[in-house]
Amino acid sequence: MSKIKHHLNDALLMSYAAGNLPEAFSLVVATHISMCDDCRARLGAFEAVGGAMLDDVAVASEVDLDATLALIEQGPKAPIRVDMSKLGLFPSALQDYVGGDLDAVKWRAVGMGVRQAILPTSKDASVRLLHIPAGCAVPDHGHRGTELTLVLQGAFKDEFDRFGPGDLEIATEEDVHTPVAEEGVDCICLAATDAPLKFRGLVQRIAQPFLRI
Amino acid sequence: MLTADTTIDEFRPTPIAVRKSARRTDDVREARIKTVSTKEQEDLRLVECVLLIRDTQDKGAFAELFRHFAPRVKGFLIKSGADASMAEECAQDVMATLWHKAHLFDPTRASVSTWVFTIARNRRIDMIRKQRRPEPDELTWGPEPEPDAADVMELQQESTRLVQALSELPDKQRDLIQKAYFGDLSHSEIADETGLPLGTIKSRIRLALEKLRHAMK
């Protein structure tokens, strides 16, 4: 895999380490970290801050040791899972939500050759897989909240930069951009947003509620 | 904090471990006795306890970890919005998970406090926020080879230094971090660059990951 150039920022890593991100964002973060050891190490550092907070916390009353030992006797609640997705394009976190790898995705057309699949998460943000044919553009849009776009395959360019496999674009309210998939391989992205996208064309604005994009 | 500590090793003698990997438990114990800082000694003892649980299902070592962490985990959960009975239930669950997952703990990448924090955090998301927690692919050492004691020492010392550095931050900044970790700040309320002194511990973990990747090949 080519070198990853666009990474998570501190705010996202700290919130993920603290466990405060919406589920949809957490999925993008977990997927990026599965592909990027730099961010995995940074996450480790932010989790170490959490460890320090735990060291420092006001202790509550005693917890029942005997009840806990009895709980241990019952065995683990869920099987202890070890990485099962060595093969395939998607890291295991993403495979859990899709129900398999790329070939298991249930795509729906959203116009102009672009296809999407919305993944089920809590309602405070949404996340979807996007399939953009090589050379095609995703409609010009701005955002009301934050939008994270992680490239899984292929690459796209927008007015600001180029994003290849493993790269993450973080777009905020001010950014209006038109991502275009590069020629060659079709581009597959995982994109999360905590507010509906604002499309600028009238037809797209009318279609938006039906397409849930 | 970095004063010389002359107290005698007051812990119970460790049972002779049965697996080959237990050699490392001995290395860690040796390192612990050599270090000078009390806090470092405590942190290394916690590592030793997890390895004892992993290798010999040592209930004494578990009780020791339990006394240290269970009331903290409960305190953490109460501070993050759980009521007392839910915090009790969650804390028991977190400690039981620690027992079952002892073989997944990697002391070259995290202190025991950090590891327990991540278990407690996941339990909180699950039980209090009722959400799923997508996790990155797990990277684990196979049965062989294991990381060496020097790497374990370095990471544990770095964690101790981080705790010290955090305690020296201005009150206002520390309050903010606490808020973030107890669930009162959203990501948009946190700066893109937090300015926390995390460079060295990050480099340590990065090195450990490189060794791990090499071992996995």
Image (tube, coloured by chain):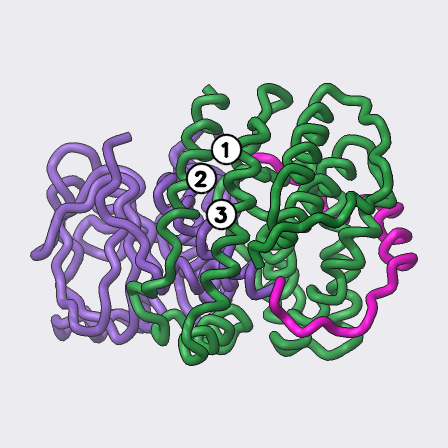
Chain colours: A purple, B green
The amino acid type found where label 2 is placed reads: Pro
Is the residue marked by circle 3 packed among few (<14), some (14-19), or many (20+) residues within 10 Å?
many
Residue B7 x %, y %: 75, 49
Magenta-highlighted residues: A55-84
Residues at marks 3 and 1 on the same chain: no
Q: Is residue B106 above or below residue A174?
A: above
Is the residue marked by circle 2 packed among few (<14), some (14-19), or many (20+) residues within 10 Å?
many
Mark 2 lies on a secondary structure that is loop
Q: Which numbered marker is on residue B158?
A: 3
In this rendering, would A123 be left or right of B91? left
Residue A125 x %, y %: 41, 68
Query: Which residue is painted at 34% across and 51% down in the image?
Result: A190
| Viewport quadrant of the C terminus of chain B | top left
Residue A179 x %, y %: 15, 54
The amino acid type found where label 1 is placed reads: Ser
Is the residue marked by circle 1 packed among few (<14), some (14-19), or many (20+) residues within 10 Å?
some
Q: Chain of mark 3?
A: B
Q: Nearer the viewer, mark 3 or mark 1?
A: 3
Disc 2: which residue: A91
The amino acid type found where label 3 is placed reads: Glu
Disc 1: which residue: A85
For the residues marked 2 and 3, what is the alpha-carbon distance in whole angstroms? 30 Å
Circles 2 and 1, Cβ within 8 Å, touching? The answer is yes
Between A53 and A25, the residue placed more toward the observer is A53
Circles 3 and 1, Cβ within 8 Å, touching? The answer is no
Mark 1 or mark 2, which is nearer the start of the sequence? 1
Between A159 and A184, the residue placed more toward the observer is A159
